[in-house]
Image: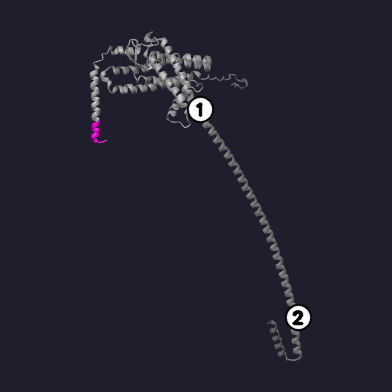
Amino acid sequence: MPLNIDWQQILLHALNFVILFAGLYFLLYRPVKAFMKKRREHYESMDAAAADKTKRAEELKASYEEKLAAADEEIAEKSRRAKAEADEAAAQIRQAAEAQAQAIVEEARASAAREKERMERGARGEIAAIVTQATEKIVLHDSASEAYDAFLNAAEKDDE
Amino acid sequence: MTKRQKIVFFSVVAAVVALLVVGIVLTNGLYERDATIQETMKDAILHGNDKISLFGLPVNPGLISAYIVTGLLLLFAAIVRIFVIPKFRYVPGKFQTMLEQAVGMFDGLARGNSPHKNGVLGAYIFAAGAYIFFGTLFELFGIPWITINGESVTLPAPLSDINGAIAMGGFTYLFILIGGIAANRGRGLLRGLKEFSLPISMSFRLFGALLSGMLVTELVYYYFALSFVVPVIVGILFTVLHAVIQAYVLSMLTSMYYGEVTEPPVKKTKRSKKIKRGSEVTV
């Protein structure tokens, strides 16, 4: 054969390589690859567990936030209701106070009117009595000037 | 180091080098060359006169190299399998990282170039890459062996033997062909056969690359004047370089062709040629 090509030696080389291929596959390649796969699966399971925990924590957080939002809403509602009730109560009190004040004022006015009428009535009686006395004095005892003076004195005394 | 110590150190080194050079020159005449450079290089290619007996069978030195390399690699693999792999940890050490990188690199190469079917491909290119790389580095050791004629010969790289290169190229082609048939039956077979030149190109690429390295080394060592400093560059740098390059090239080509023959066929969608008469417009 040209170039010293020998089929027997080619087959011997091929046999050698087949043995090497099989040996390296079973002794080195497969065990190392199996270990790498095992490690990858280990870290993937850890990753999945971490992702699951994160997801659950996020769900928990979302539910808490929802609850907090509901509580805020409830607090605001209660606050609104309390304010409305307080406003209503204040309005009622104010109305009652105004009514009471109105009644007091009217009562005071009526009382003042009654007092005024009573005083006018009293003053009219006293004036009449004074006039009667003065007239009696003038007519019965003194001259007209004395009577007039006596009338004025009596009037001043009354004013005091 | 003081100035005096430096002077002493360099003087001793220079004296040793000078003595060695004198010794080399004086002993050169003791050994007469029994072949010219042409004969030496012809022997390196054809191995006409340097056959070695393998259980009575005359074989090329490259075959002995191949068996030694395989034996060493399998011994290493067995030691690693028994003593190292059971102690693998999730956080790897340096040696574990190196092994994982090697396996992961070939596995990634197989997955990247042959995404549809790559179960055994990764293991195949791992073995082929390791064989080419360590087989090529093997020639650096220059292990001597006795030929049938009683002469001494240095064991070359296994793939610098043309029979080794043809075995590697042919077996790789066979592997690709079987992969194609397993994945796509008749279509895979046709795709494999289409690349009929592959075993020849793979074989002779390996043979040419490794033989050229060996010939350059032979040439350098043949001449006395070239035996200083130059072998360091030629012997180590070139050998390491083409060990890496050839291992990568064959792994890459194998995975690419394997990916090509195992790729599932793409179904062509039939276009409807029916035209509704009602939709035709007459001018």
Q: Which residue is drawn at 49% across and 27% down?
A: A35
Which one is nearer the viewer's eye here, B166 or A75? B166
Which one is nearer the viewer's eye here, B262 or B145? B145
Give above or below for B12 relative to A107.
above
Q: Where is residue A70 in the image (x, y as percent from the top left)?
A: 63, 46
Question: Is A66 inside the magenta-drawn segment?
Answer: no
Q: In this view, does A150 lie to the left or right of A70?
A: right
Q: Which residue is drawn at 66% across and 54% down?
A: A84
Which circle marks residue A37 in the picture?
A: 1
Which of disc 1 and disc 2 is earlier in sequence?
Answer: 1
**Image quarter (top left, top right, bottom left or bottom right) of the C terminus of chain B:** top right
Give above or below for A41 relative to B166.
below
Q: What element carries label 1?
A: helix
Which residue in the structure is indicated by mark 2?
Answer: A125
Q: Is residue B71 left or right of residue A116?
A: left
Q: Position of residue B187 (x, y in %)?
A: 52, 15
Q: Main secondary structure of the magenta part?
A: helix
Please tell me how crowded label 2 is: few (under 14), some (14-19), or many (20+) other residues with Cα within 10 Å: few
